[in-house]
Amino acid sequence: NFVKGHVPELYIENERIKIRYLPCPCKVKYDEERLNSQLITSHHMQRDTLNAKIKDIYTTGRNRLDIAMQVNDICKKLINGENVKG
């Protein structure tokens, strides 16, 4: 029997083959996205805003492109653990 959202992994312990179930990478990503969306929904944001990605920003105008580049820089700094203002 498989555990939903997990993948089996065989390993040897005390000269016996055993099995353990590890979370599937897709399930881990899904759980993280679900947790993040639950944190944000308390602000009563529209679904489009909640699901927005940086790649969804229209870059047709120069101002929008500049803002998108600044947002991208801020995101990279946040990922690297740097303090960011703005």
Image (cartoon, rainbow, N blue to C red):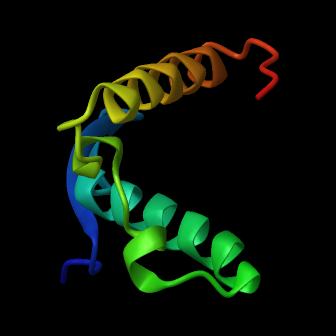
* In the rendered image, the vertical position of residue 18 relative to residue 44, given as above or below: above
- Determine if residue 16 is in view: no
Nearer to the camera, 26 or 55: 55
Rendered-image quadrant of the N terminus:
bottom left
**Quarter holding residue 10:** top left
| Left or right, residue 84 beside residue 72 | right
> Does residue 37 sit above or below 58 in this rendering?
below
Report if residue 40 is visible in the image. yes
Residue at 25% across, 34% down: 61
Q: Residue at 49% x, 59% y: name it.
A: 32
Left/right of residue 84 with respect to residue 75 in the rendered view? right
For the C terminus, the image quarter is top right
Q: Residue at x 66, y 72 (%)?
A: 40
Residue 30, image quadrant: bottom left
Relative vertical location of residue 28 with respect to residue 62 in this rendering, above or below = below
Q: Is residue 61 above or below residue 46?
A: above
Residue at image x 43%, y 83%? Answer: 47
Find residue 43 and report its horizontal and vertical position in percent.
Answer: 74, 79
Along the horizontal axis of the image, is 35 left or right of 9? Answer: right
At which x and y percent is residue 67? 46, 29
- Residue 36: x percent and y percent? 58, 64
Where on the picture, by quarter, is residue 83? top right
Q: Nearer the viewer, residue 61 or 50?
A: 61
Observer-nearest of 26 and 61: 61
x%, y% of residue 69? 40, 20
- Number of labels in the image equals 0
